[in-house]
Amino acid sequence: MTATGVAPGKVLLVGEHGVVHGGVAFALPFPAVEARAELRAEPGPLRLESPIWSGILDADTPPPAAGLAAAALATFALLDRPATGWVAHLEASIPLGAGLGSSAATAAALVRGILLAHGRVPGDEVDALVHLAEQAAHGTPSGVDGRVITVGQPIAFRRGETLDETQLVPTGAVFNLVVGYTGVTRRTQVAVARVTAFKDNEPVAAHAAMEAIKALAWEAIAAWRAGDAVAVGTCLDGAQAQLERLGVSTPELETLIRAARDAGALGAKLTGAGMGGCMLALARDATHADELVRALAGAATVWKQEYRP
Ligand code: MEV
């Protein structure tokens, strides 16, 4: 008996860091990359096979997979079944630490795989189970990664809010995004701590940047609904300026952002926690997205993704 759980990556269009401090994050699933967990029935303790770590998933699983173990054990508890008799084989095309939601997506794929292996169709419960894994991986994340990855649609996310349909952001026109990876892994916890330190040391400047990010996130949500790509692009550029003020941008990110803007991107910014990781750019159309991909030849990896109404 086998079952396969799948989950996409994610990008934050606008609102990273603001969402940690009470703002809204406008988040999109990013199916150009994905995680897959194949569950195979096999006698013995629950085991994980993955490129980052392989071994038994239990309360003593060490840090690289401690979050996955927590989510897996909680899933078996929810099913009221003992956590034995399965091997989970995990694979992902999402680079680790690139800001594309690899930790949340691998946890979501694993939880879905376990549920499917027990004949249960995965639903809203996946979000909370993924959040357990995210807390182990990132400390106190806002929960945006797990939420957008499990919902699989663009969302306006605020910390602590339960999912309802007011969070869903319909796509008003075809949008073409291009994402470039600097090749530098970022650590969300380090970037979030840097912003918190900036808040403590320069409260006035930090407050202004944070408020601007929150306003830009709402503007981008309205523009996305209205199908106004030019206005979305302006929000992206505005958010990048604020993220630079917060100190989470890097020369590597800015080189790629400049290359995208020079090639006519409607807007470009870092995405995710920053301090490495990925940038994204909004293209005019599908042909222009191909041009942006070429312009980002200096990136470690480039992906494109179309969003349709
Ligand atoms: C991570 O994708 C985005 C941050 O806002 C952190 C979080 O929301 O937990 C930087």
Image (cartoon, helix red, strand yellow):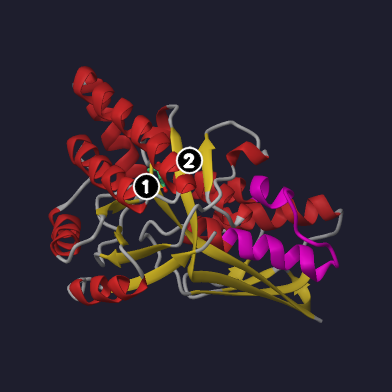
Q: Position of residue 78 (x, y in %)?
A: 81, 50
Kindly indicate the quadrant of the structure image that contains residue 11: bottom left
Q: What is the chief secondary structure element of the magenta stretch?
A: helix
* Secondary element at tag 1: helix
Q: Is residue 68 visible?
A: yes
Quadrant in which the C terminus is drawn: bottom right
Q: Is mark 2 within 8 Å of ligand 1?
A: yes
Q: Is residue 103 above or below residue 192?
A: below
The kind of residue tagged 1 is Thr
**Visible in this render: residue 53?**
no
Image quadrant occupied by the N terminus: bottom right
Secondary structure beneath dot 2 equals loop
Q: Is residue 111 magenta?
A: yes
Q: Specify whether 179 is left or right of 114.
A: left
Q: Which residue is mark 1?
A: 188
Question: Is label 2 in contact with label 1 (beta carbons under 8 Å)?
Answer: yes
Which x, y percent locates residue 183?
Answer: 26, 67
Camera-side residue: 2 or 267? 267
Given residues 89 and 302, the one toward you in this image is 302
Q: Which residues are magenta?
A: 107-129
The answer for how far apart the CA atoms under marks 2 and 1 are is 9 Å
Which image quadrant shows ligand 1?
Answer: top left
At label 2, which amino acid type do we have? Pro
Tell whether circle 1 marks a residue whose Cβ is less than 8 angstroms from ligand 1: yes
Mark linked to residue 141:
2
Mark 2 and mark 1 lie on one chain; the one further toward the N terminus is 2
